[in-house]
Image (cartoon, rainbow, N blue to C red):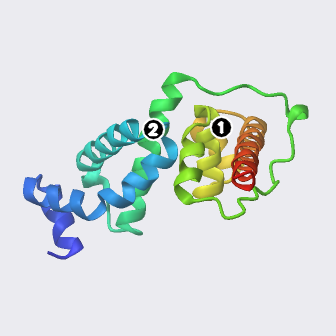
């Protein structure tokens, strides 16, 4: 079944087509959920919520742009909506902002370790870090989507990077001491 046929069948609420859509895209969308969620179980819940929203709103997709991009946007928004309700963000004075453009030196750290330490970040830091670094949103876009100021976004990113850099440094020093 082509993607256009699959979308059409999903608009008709065909359960088999919905299952096929889930099979085709669950891996891609799950990776997004993992980046924004504090653990694997919550990422699974967020994936299910995202697909429920996708199936509910599929009529709104009008073949403008990428269907996969549309689903990714819904997934990000579904996860962010959950955290917006939890009010996980600090309000920050713009003068307190640290340099948010500092690069994290990973020195060959395994990807599974990086994902683990990103998931361990406090919600406010993890969400901003994921949006800015992994999904290329601007601070202005992040601020609008999360209902925070640009300064809070920049500050949360700087703090996230600082925490991650510390954990990577500790990890690397443990490797050297083996």
Which mark identifies residue 11?
Answer: none
Residue 104 seen anywhere in this rendered image of the structure: yes
Q: Identify the secondary structure beneath mark 1.
A: helix
Q: Is residue 3 above or below residue 178?
A: below
Residue at position x 38%, y 55% in the image: 29
178 or 9, which lies in front? 178
Residue at position x 62%, y 33% in the image: 124
Q: Residue furthest right?
A: 95
97 with respect to 153 (left or right): right
Q: Identify the secondary structure beneath mark 2.
A: loop
In the picture, residue 26 is in which quadrant? bottom left
Q: Provide residue 136's location: percent of width, then percent of height.
A: 62, 59
Residue 14 seen anywhere in this rendered image of the structure: no
Q: Residue furthest front?
A: 178
Q: Provide residue 128's location: percent of width, then percent of height.
A: 64, 43
Of pointers 2 and 1, the one earlier in the residue sequence: 2
Q: Is residue 11 above or below residue 91?
A: below
Residue under circle 1?
A: 125
In the picture, residue 127 is in which quadrant? top right
115 or 43, which lies in front? 115
Q: Provide residue 154's location: percent of width, then percent of height.
A: 76, 42
Residue at position x 58%, y 59% in the image: 110
Residue under circle 2?
A: 39
């Amino acid at each position: 079944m082509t993607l256009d046929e699959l979308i059409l069948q999903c608009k008709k609420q065909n359960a088999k087509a919905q299952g096929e859509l889930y099979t085709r895209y669950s891996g891609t969308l799950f990776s997004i959920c993992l980046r924004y969620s504090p653990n694997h179980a919550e990422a699974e819940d967020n994936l299910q919520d995202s697909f429920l929203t996708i199936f509910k709103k599929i009529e709104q997709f009008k073949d403008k742009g990428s269907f996969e991009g549309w689903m990714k946007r819904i997934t990000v928004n579904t996860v962010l909506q959950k955290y917006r309700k939890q009010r996980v963000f600090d309000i920050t004075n713009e003068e307190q902002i640290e340099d948010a453009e500092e690069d994290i030196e990973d020195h060959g750290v395994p990807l599974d370790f990086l994902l683990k330490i990103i998931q361990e970040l406090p919600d406010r830091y993890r969400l901003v870090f994921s949006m800015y670094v992994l999904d290329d949103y601007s601070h202005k876009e992040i601020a609008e989507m999360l209902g925070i100021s640009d300064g809070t976004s920049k500050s949360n990113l700087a703090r996230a990077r600082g925490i991650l850099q510390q954990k990577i440094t500790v990890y690397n020093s443990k490797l050297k001491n083996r």
